[in-house]
Image (tube, rainbow, N blue to C red):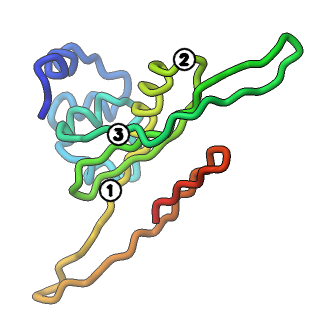
Amino acid sequence: MVSKMEESELAQWKPRTKLGKKVKEGEITSLSQIFESGNRPREVEIIDSLVPELEEEVLNVNLVQRMHRSGRRMSFRVAAAVGNQDGIIGVSHTSSREVAPSIQKAISEAKLRVVEIRRGVEAGSVAVLVHIQFHLRSVAGEEVSELI
C-alpha cells in the first residue's frame, strides 16, 4: 500500500524526462508499456507511481575496509532487492561511507533496475512455460548471491 507521505511526494513530483511526463499525465499506465517500447525508467518516481505495492528488502550489509596512505577507509556495501511478488523484481548493490544513505541508494538503484519476469504465456488452452533469460550473480567478499 502507498502511504499518505508517498502519495504527497508523488503529487509534488516534477518529472525530468519525457517518459516521466507521460507517466504523470497518464499516457503510460504500466511497466509493460515501457519495456515493450524499449525504454528504461530513469526516475525512481516512475516505478513508485506505476507499481505502488513494491516491497523493499535489504539482503546484505557489509563493512568494507581498504588501506589508504592516511589510514583505513571504511565504507558499507549494501545489497537490496525490490519486488511485488507478481513478476516484477529489481536487484542492486551500492556502497557508501554511512549505512543509511547506502541503504537508500541501493533501494533506489534496485527500483531503476527493475525487470518484468514473464512466468507463463497462454497459448490457446495450453500454458507454455517461458524461461527467465538472465542470470544475476553478486559477489561480496566471501558471500555469493545468485538469482537464477
Q: Nearer the viewer, residue 90 or 126?
A: 90
Residue 85 vs residue 73: left or right?
left
Q: CA distance from mark 1 to mark 2?
A: 31 Å
Q: Dot 2: what SS?
A: loop
Residue shown at 37%/52% (left/top)? 115
Q: Earlier in the sequence, mark 3 or mark 1?
A: 3
Residue shown at 58%/27% (left/top)? 76
Question: Quarter-wise, where is residue 49 in the image?
Answer: top left
- Nearest to viewer (mark 1 / mark 2): 2
Q: Which mark is residue 72?
A: none
Residue shown at 82%/14% (left/top)? 71
Query: Dot 2, crowdedness within 10 Å: few (<14), some or many (≥20)?
Result: few
Amino acid at circle 3: Glu
Q: Dot 3: what SS?
A: strand
Q: Which mark is residue 57?
A: 3
Q: Earlier in the sequence, mark 2 or mark 3?
A: 3
Q: Nearer the viewer, residue 54 or 97?
A: 97
Q: Earlier in the sequence, mark 1 or mark 2?
A: 2
132 is higher (above) or lower (below) than 11: below
Can residue 124 be seen here?
yes
Q: Horizontal and vertical percent for residue 29?
A: 17, 43
Q: Are marks 3 and 1 in contact (CB under 8 Å)?
A: no
Q: Are marks 2 and 3 in contact (CB under 8 Å)?
A: no
Residue 69 vs residue 52: left or right?
right
Q: Give the quadrant of the N terminus.
A: top left
Q: Nearer the viewer, residue 46 or 113?
A: 113
Q: Which residue is mark 2?
A: 98
Amino acid at circle 2: Glu
Q: Which mark is residue 116?
A: 1
Question: Quarter-wise, where is residue 40 in the image?
Answer: top left
